[in-house]
Image (cartoon, rainbow, N blue to C red):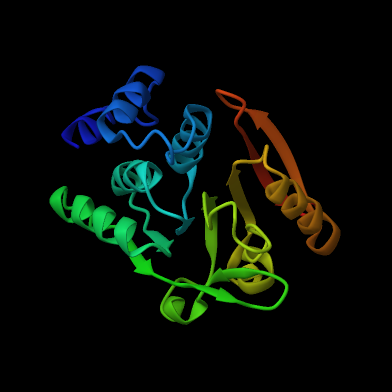
């Protein structure tokens, strides 16, 4: 794990540093692609307001280490107790106190399932960046629940980084976000067939 923190020697981390960070974390089956990690690091570096993360993992450590240097708070939601305790232990070990992780079970909201929003009662009123690598791909409605449930907590110039944009569930999510909330999305190619999207509001 120490390789992850030591790999973030610059702001934003270099490509070499990101490779070091990846090798320190492992978890090949679930971690975000390098292209997505690079986007997360680049945008986090210039983000001035609170950051919301959906789904924890390597991105949590990356967000925490960068945001600690820029003075920004990170708030993360995780539905899996296993990942919640793992990431909490890592954050505590490296004293990344600017990251607050909440265990939030997935709740059925009718047309979709998403994190139980009862745990966000003390979250900031306005997030500047959302890093969405959850809920998992087999969740009903994919990741669409962010806007129906938390749109009022997003800043006017919010940027949303959505991972796994190559999947059908995320394609549907982006289509619905555009139709219902005027979201504009740019899709980028990552490694090994992975894609990710950068989303903003059309009118902003």
190 to 128, vertically: above or below: above
Q: Residue 28: x and y, percent?
A: 39, 33
The image quadrant of residue 114 is: bottom right
| Number of marks in the rendered image | 0
Q: Residue 142: x and y, percent?
A: 65, 57
Which image quarter holds the C terminus?
bottom right
Which residue is nearer to you in this view: 74 or 36? Answer: 36
In the picture, measured across the screen, residue 68 lies left or right of residue 50, that is left
Q: Residue 146: x and y, percent?
A: 62, 64
In the picture, measured across the screen, residue 115 lies left or right of residue 159, that is left
In the picture, measured across the screen, residue 102 lies left or right of residue 49, that is left
Outermost residue to the left? 93
46 to 140, vertically: above or below: above
Which image quarter holds the N terminus?
top left
Query: Which residue is depicted at the point 37% across and 47% down?
Result: 57
Query: Which residue is depicted at the point 36% across and 48% down?
Result: 60
The image quadrant of residue 105 is: bottom left
Outermost residue to the top? 16
Outermost residue to the front? 138
Q: Is residue 10 visible?
A: no
Q: Residue 110: x and y, percent?
A: 70, 78
145 to 135, vertically: above or below: below
Query: Which residue is depicted at the point 43% across and 71% down?
Result: 104
Query: Which residue is depicted at the point 64% across and 54% down?
Result: 157
Q: Is residue 149 visible?
A: yes
Which residue is nearer to you in this view: 156 or 78? Answer: 78
């Amino acid at each position: 794990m120490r390789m992850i923190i030591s790999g973030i020697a610059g702001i934003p981390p270099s490509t070499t540093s990101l490779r070091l960070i990846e090798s320190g974390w492992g978890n090949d089956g679930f971690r975000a692609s390098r292209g997505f990690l690079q986007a997360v690091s680049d945008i986090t570096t210039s983000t001035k307001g609170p950051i919301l993360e959906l789904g924890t993992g390597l991105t949590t450590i990356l967000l925490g280490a960068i945001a600690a240097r820029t003075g920004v708070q990170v708030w993360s939601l995780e539905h899996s107790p296993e990942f919640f305790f793992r990431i909490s232990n890592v954050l505590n070990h490296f004293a990344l106190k600017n990251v607050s992780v909440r265990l939030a079970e997935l709740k059925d909201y009718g047309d979709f399932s998403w994190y139980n929003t009862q745990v966000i009662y003390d979250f900031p009123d306005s997030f500047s960046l959302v890093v969405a690598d959850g809920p998992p791909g087999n969740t009903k409605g994919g990741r669409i629940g962010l806007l129906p449930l938390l749109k009022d907590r997003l800043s006017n110039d919010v940027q949303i980084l959505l991972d796994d944009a190559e999947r059908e569930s995320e394609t549907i999510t982006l289509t619905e976000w555009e139709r219902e909330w005027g979201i504009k999305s740019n899709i980028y190619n990552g490694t090994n067939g992975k894609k990710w999207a950068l989303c903003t509001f059309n009118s902003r």
